[in-house]
Each structure stands twice: as structure tokens, then as C-alpha cells.
Amino acid sequence: MSPRRAIRSFHRDALGDWYALLECGHHQHTRHNPPWTNRAWVESSFGRMAMLGTLLPCPHCVQLVAANPPGRQAS
């Protein structure tokens, strides 16, 4: 399970899709792509503003944790 991180801001990628900048510094796409992903809130500035601070899973952080499990000494 990916650790959850707060949304700090929103930006668009080169294709125009929205992504969230998370508190950890990683990015997470927040596409509205029904029926698979229903995020209609991302389509309006009010919707995005209302989601600031909301927690999203960060798959990038889970990869870092898997590569450096707790208790493992850095070499």
C-alpha cells in the first residue's frame, strides 16, 4: 500500500493532463477518465482548490520505502 501524502498544488503536464504536487515533492496524475477514474473535481479550479490538503497515495514513496526498508543501514 502506498503512503498517503497531502496535495500542495496542481499543474498540467505537456499533454494538458492535471497532476498534483504532493507534500513529499513527488507528482501524481489526477486525471478525470470515466469510467475507470472519476475525478470530475479536477476539471474546475474550484474543485482543485477544494482538494488541496487531501491525501493521495504516492507510488513513488512506496518504491523508496521498498528500496530502503526501516532498520536497514546505508552502505
Image: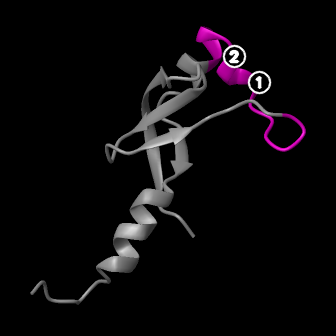
Q: Quadrant of the N terminus?
A: bottom right
Magenta includes 28?
no
Residue 55, compared with residue 41, is above or below; it is below
Residue at the spot 53% in from the left edge and 17% down from the top edge: 49
Q: Residues within 10 Å of mark 2 (few under 14, many from 20)?
A: some
Q: How is the image coloured?
A: one colour
Residue 43, percent across and down?
Answer: 69, 16
Check residue 28 in the rendering and tell me which mark sits there, or answer none.
Answer: none
Look at 48% across and 54% down and name the residue there.
58
Image point (50%, 25%), residue name: 13
The part of the image, by quadrant, that contains residue 73 is bottom left
Is 73 left, or right, of 10 in this rendering?
left
Q: What x and y, as percent, mark residue 69?
A: 32, 83
Per the image, the residue denoted by label 2 is: 43
* Residue at the extreme front: 14
**Helix, strand or loop for disc 1:** helix
* Residue 41 screen position, x and y as percent: 70, 22
Q: Is residue 35 left or right of residue 48?
A: right
Circles 1 and 2 in contact, beta carbons < 8 Å: yes
Query: Is the residue 60 above or below the residue 18 in the image?
Result: below
Q: Quadrant of the C terminus?
A: bottom left
Residue topped by disc 1? 40
Query: Which residue type carries mark 2?
Result: Glu
**Position of residue 48 measured from the top left corner of the image (x, y, whole percent):** 58, 20
